[in-house]
Image: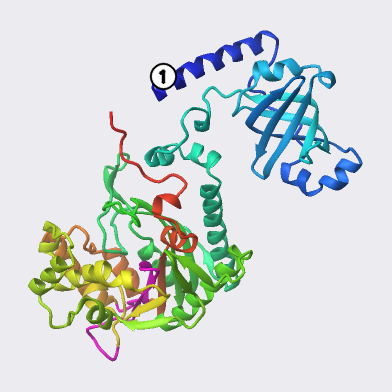
Amino acid sequence: MNFMATQDKIKKLRIKKLESLKKVGWDGYPAQTKRDTEIAAALNNFDAWSKEERKIVIAGRIMSMRGQGGIAFVDLRDESGSIQLVFKKDSLKDFDRVGEFLDIGDFIEAGGYLFKTQRGEDSLFIESWKLLTKTLRPLPSEWYGLKDVEERFRRRYLDLILNDDVKKRLVLRSKIIQAIRDFLNSYGFLEVETPILQTLPGGALAKPFQTKLNALNMDLYLRIAPELYLKRLIVAGFEKIYEIGRNFRNEGMDRSHNPEFTMLELYWAYQDYEGLMILVEDMFAFILNNAFSQTKNPLLVNINGNLVNFKKPWLRLEFKEVIRKYAGLDADKAEAKEILEKMKEHKIEITKEHKKQDKWELIDEVYKKICLPNLIQPTFVIHLPAALSPLAKLRTENKEEVQRFLIAIGGMEAGNAFSELNDPLDQDARFREQEKKRRAGNEEASRYDKDFVEALEYGMPPTAGIGIGLDRLVILLTNAEGIKEVIFFPFMRKREK
């Protein structure tokens, strides 16, 4: 009998149980419970409460059941922990219905007092109980175990029930994001929200998702970044702002990419990219010391077998030096043909899109595919080419480069920051150059945003901004295999028929 047939058979049996308990006047899905204690609280206070025989009521999911004559043992779990329940026939009016009505996976309420069994196990002696939710499908451990990786992600709710490591990692994700908020709020930053549906996609080089607003017959795009709206707020007089929210990019999926992802984007008026580097170093230390406070040395993190030290100061490497050191290319002199040959040499598949790209777009690909995997310790890769940075301020020392840095950790890009371009004439020219690339077939090129240029004409003070991919950050700090392991519900392809 295959897995689905087994599921259907078990479901039919449980529906019969549900009908039987209705006949005796029981509700399989009551709205109320008298729970007054979480399991963790019961275990933490076990000695004192068991001594005084305090009566408590707990509730949770049945994870296992076993019988022994006139005694039934049930392992019950709520979000805080697990405890053994002991049902005795001679002490309980509805004892026979424990075996008759209950199954693994059901939710129950259980009242009684704490005691230790003869084997010394902390337990709850049951004086009353109540069915809270009758489950119709068995947990995977009852039929074949949730071993298929695809099914783990499709049925994430089951994965979280059965896999404590997955749950711990996702809890850590929430703690990391909370630590970021606590750090930035303590620095006087204000959390804001900007539109997700936008008339023009801007703020990054990426292909957008397109949709339509029927009410106004307008084409709209899911944002690829909140950058241009956040900068409008800097123009409006806000000096320290940030947003944590979802972005959407219609691009490939791999270990570090999901079509929708969570970003931190921050803007700081009267500051430059140098000041942001110091902020980033301090923020990472705060995150590790708070979200990973139980770790012996929170600033030392194992990432893919490498011990990564987040102690400041971090390494600072010139972008072109990184290209020269790890790819053997002179970024200024190399032509597109030579760069494509270098990519072939490193077994990078050359696509139609690559053949449309100019030399600097190809150099960017070389950085990501060849150089970045070598940057293990926390590193600021600084001074990128102006051709790759349409929204960044030029360096006074070299007008071909910008005041920008990338954050590289554990061979992965974790953030992007720069001194923001606030010259409306320069911004206008760069937007027009990006428009030419888009018309030539580059779907990731920035669109000309006339409204944003107009906002800059009203004046934006010197400003530094940064974007950090929070999904990637969690991958790094929790040593996860990929992005699907750190998102509660990752995007999945359609099931095969």
Residue 253: image location, x then y, percent: 30, 51
Residue where numbered disc 1 is placed: 5
Please report the bounds of the magenta region as a residue range: 396-423
Q: Residue at x 32, y 64 (%)?
A: 203
**Which of the two residues, 129 or 278, is positioned nearer the viewer here?**
129
* Residue 283 located left or right of residue 40: left
Residue 416: image location, x then y, percent: 37, 70
- In the figure, 330 relative to 10: above or below? below
Residue 411: image location, x then y, percent: 36, 68
Identify the colour scheme used.
Answer: rainbow
Q: Secondary structure at mark 1?
A: helix
* Residue 200 located left or right of residue 490: left
* Residue 80 located left or right of residue 137: right
- In the figure, 102 relative to 33: above or below? above
Q: Residue at x 82, y 45 (%)?
A: 46
Q: Residue at x 27, y 68 (%)?
A: 368
Q: Is residue 420 magenta?
A: yes
